[in-house]
């Protein structure tokens, strides 16, 4: 049984922009699975037994590494662990990257990541027509109650770009947030 999906939430891994998370022995999703294990995240046994049994902790439903490889984590419809207060009825997508070592140029992703994210969102939108797409930071609590989430109210900057401005632009590749290697 699956829950209806109402939100698709975009995140970043808060690792170095353009740096592949996959290594010789583990995929990006497996690396994140270890981080989430350390944070105490745990999938329910009925869920991991039937879907990605080697990922028992990961909170996201999808991970997109810098080479554009899309991996699944939790099963769509399974409650995630990626955004406080909105984990039910949502899908969490994690873009690898977000941080830059010079402290500037946050949220830069490779062309392959933008293409993969765009394609994934098109698929998910057609499967879940009532879902609204947003960034993690757009779901921060509205502290002053004025109805808009302003930058000083962002719990953190994740995914370090304006998701709605990108979607409105109609562009696949977000040139302002493109990682050039
Ligand atoms: Zn996030």
Image (cartoon, rainbow, N blue to C red):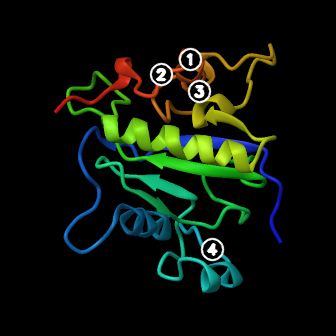
Estimate the spatial distance between the alpha carbons at disc 4 and disc 1, rounded to whole Å.
33 Å
Q: Whole-percent x and y of residue 48?
A: 61, 80
Question: Tag 4's secondary structure?
Answer: loop
Q: Earlier along the polypeptide chain: callout 3 or callout 2?
A: 3
Per the image, the residue denoted by label 4 is 43
Label of residue 154 in the image: 3
Per the image, the residue denoted by label 2 is 171
Q: Whole-percent x and y of residue 7?
A: 73, 42
Q: Nearer the viewer, mark 2 or mark 1?
A: 2
Q: Quadrant of residue 181?
A: top left
Q: Whole-percent x and y of residue 115?
A: 41, 38
Q: Nearer the viewer, mark 4 or mark 2?
A: 2
Per the image, the residue denoted by label 1 is 165
Q: Left or right: 163 with respect to 85?
A: left
Estimate the spatial distance between the alpha carbons at disc 2 and disc 1, rounded to whole Å.
10 Å
Estimate the spatial distance between the alpha carbons at disc 4 and disc 2, rounded to whole Å.
35 Å
Estimate the spatial distance between the alpha carbons at disc 4 and disc 3, rounded to whole Å.
27 Å
Q: Earlier along the polypeptide chain: callout 3 or callout 1?
A: 3
Estimate the spatial distance between the alpha carbons at disc 3 and disc 1, rounded to whole Å.
16 Å
Q: Whole-percent x and y of residue 72?
A: 51, 63
Q: Nearer the viewer, residue 42 or 117?
A: 117
Question: Tag 1's secondary structure?
Answer: helix
Residue most extreme to the left: 181
Estimate the spatial distance between the alpha carbons at disc 3 and disc 2, rounded to whole Å.
25 Å
Residue name at image x 60 percent, y 17 percent = 168
Mark 3 residue crowding within 10 angstroms, few (<14) / some (14–19) / many (20+): some
Q: Quadrant of residue 49?
A: bottom right
**Relative to 19, does residue 21 appear above or below in the rendering?**
below
Mark 2 residue's CB less than 8 Å from ligand 1: no
């Amino acid at each position: 049984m699956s829950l209806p999906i109402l939100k698709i939430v975009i995140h970043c891994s808060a690792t170095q922009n353009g740096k592949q998370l996959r290594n010789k022995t583990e995929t990006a999703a497996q690396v994140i699975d270890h981080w989430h294990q350390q944070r105490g995240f745990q999938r329910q046994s009925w869920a991991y037994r039937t879907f990605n049994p080697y990922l028992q902790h990961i909170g996201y439903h999808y991970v997109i590494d810098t080479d554009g490889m899309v991996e699944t984590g939790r099963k769509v419809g399974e409650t995630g662990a990626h955004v406080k207060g909105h984990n039910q009825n949502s899908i969490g997508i994690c873009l690898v990257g977000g941080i830059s070592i010079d402290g500037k140029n946050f949220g830069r992703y490779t062309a392959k990541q933008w293409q993969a994210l765009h394609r994934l969102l098109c698929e998910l939108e057609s499967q879940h027509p009532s879902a609204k797409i947003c960034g993690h930071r757009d779901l921060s609590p509205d502290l002053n109650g004025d109805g808009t989430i302003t930058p000083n109210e962002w719990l953190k900057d994740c995914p370090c770009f304006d998701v709605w401005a990108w979607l409105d632009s109609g562009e696949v590749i977000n040139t302002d947030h493109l990682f050039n290697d």
